[in-house]
Image (spheres, grey):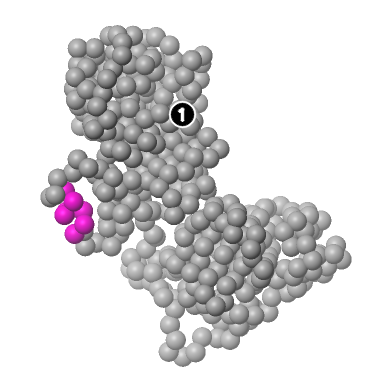
Amino acid sequence: MKLKIDPVVFNEIYLKHQLRNQNRYQIYYGGSSSGKSYSLAQRTVLDVMKGRNYLIVRNTQNTIKRSVFNEVTKAISSFKLSEYFTVNKTDFVITCNWNNKQILFAGLDDPEKIKSITPIEGVITDVWVEEATECDYKAVKQLDKRLRGRSKFKKRLTLSFNPILQDHWLYTEYFGIWDDGLQFIAKDDVSILKTTYKDNRFLTPDDIVALENETDPYYYEVYTLGNWGVMGAVIFKNWRVEDLSEIKKTFDKIRHGLDFGFADDPNALVDLHYDKSRKRLFIFGEEYQTGLVNDEIAEMIRPHVGQRVVTCDNSELKTIKELRLRKINAIAAKKGPGSIEAGIRFLQGLEIIICTSCPNTKMEFSKYKWREDKNGNVLPVPVDKDNHIIDAIRYALEDEIGTAKLKIGSKIRLGVR
C-alpha cells in the first residue's frame, strides 16, 4: 500500500524533526497546545502501517481513554484510514488489519499487565510515554527494557510532556546535551525537540489569546513558553545553558576552584572564565567525584589546571599541602564571615553561561535554594545542599568577590514562591 498524505495536515516542525526520527531516545516537550501529542499520534498510525508495534502508556490506566487513545483514533480518522483498523475500546488495543501490527495501551499502575503485554505479531518496536513527568524513573527504565527482540526496525523510547520543575528526573537524565539557544538537538542517540503554541498552526485565535494572557509567572513560563519551571526559593535564575566547546578556545582568563568531599559529598572541580567588562561568567568544565584519595584528586585536577592556580576549600589544609607536593598549584581560599552571602550577591549580578558538558553545574544552579520557615516564608539563609560546584566557583572568584560581610541595608535577591 502506498499512502499519499498532504503535508498540510502536519505542523511543519514535527514534519521536519519527528516523522522520520530514528534516535533511540526521543524527547518532545514544551508548552501547552503545541501539538506534541497529536503529532505523535499521527506518527504512530503511519508507523504501524509500515510494520511497527507500539506500546503507549501513561502513569495511570484511567487517563488513557480520554487522552492519548482518543488522539490516535482521531489521527486514524483524519487520515481516512478507519477501514484498515479495528479499534477495541474495551481492551484498549488498535489493530491494523492490513498487516496485523498493533497499538497497545496500558497504565503504569498495572505493572503485571505491562510485563505480559505483547502484540499478536512481532515485537514491540516503540514505547511512547505520554505525560512522562507523571511517571516514576524506575517504571520508565523498565519500559526501556521491554524494547527487545528481533525486528527490522530500530527500537525507540519516546517521552512527551510539559516541563515542570528542573529537579525532575527527566531533566537530570536527558537534558545534559541541551542548549537553551536551540529548538532541536540530536546527540548520542538522544533527540530533544522543544515546541510551543507558536509551532501549532491549527490553534484558534481564542486559544492563542488565552495562552498569551496567562498572568501567573510560573504557568506562563511552563505552559505558554514551554520552559522548565524554577523551584520556588531557588537562589539563581540568571543562568542559561549553551555549547561552549568552540568559544572556550578563546578564553584567556581561566580560573579553577575545588571543593573537597569524600563519601557522600563529591570533590567538585570547576573551570571558568570571567569576562569582567561584560559581567559574564562562563563555566565550561567540571569534575564531580566521590571517594577519592589525595593521589586520585591530583590526577583528577591535573588535566584541567596544568600549571594554573586552583583555589581550594580551606577546611582541608593538609590535603592542599599534599596536592602541592604532587605539583598541583593549589592554594587555600580565604572564605571568612559573610563570604557565602557576598558570593551569592556577586553571582546574582552576573550573566552566567553553563556549558552543555557540565550537567552537575546545571543541576546545582537549578536546585540551590533559600531556607524556608514552617509557613513557607523564604529566609535569607541558603540551604547547605546542592552547592559543591557553586562553592568552588566562589573560591575561584574570591579576589573579585571579596570576603567582607554584607553592609547593613544591602540586599540579596530571594526567590519568590
Label 1 crowd bin: few (<14), some (14–19), many (20+), radius 10 Å: some
Front-lying residue, 259 or 5: 5
Residue holding disc 1 = 22
Farthest-out residue, bottom: 408
Q: Which region shows up in magenta? A: 207-213
Relative height, residue 237 to residue 198 (above, below): below
Report the side of 141 relative to 81 (left or right): right
Quadrant holding the C terminus: bottom left
Residue 355 position, x and y percent, is 55, 56
Residue 300 position, x and y percent, is 74, 55
Residue depicted at x 46% and y 29% = 22
Residue depicted at x 47% and y 24% = 155
- Disc 1 marks a residue whose amino acid type is Gln
Residue depicted at x 33% and y 46% = 195
Farthest-out residue, right: 325
Visible residue check, residue 416: yes
Relative height, residue 30 to residue 254 (above, below): above
The magenta stretch spans residue 208: yes
Report the side of 391 relative to 111 (left or right): right
Residue 405, picture quadrant = bottom right
Residue 8, picture quadrant = top left
Residue 34 position, x and y percent, is 27, 44
Residue depicted at x 31% and y 10% = 1
Relative height, residue 401 to residue 304 (above, below): below
Front-lying residue, 355 or 166: 355
Visible residue check, residue 382: no
In the structure shown, which secondary structural element does the residue marked by tag 1 occupy? loop
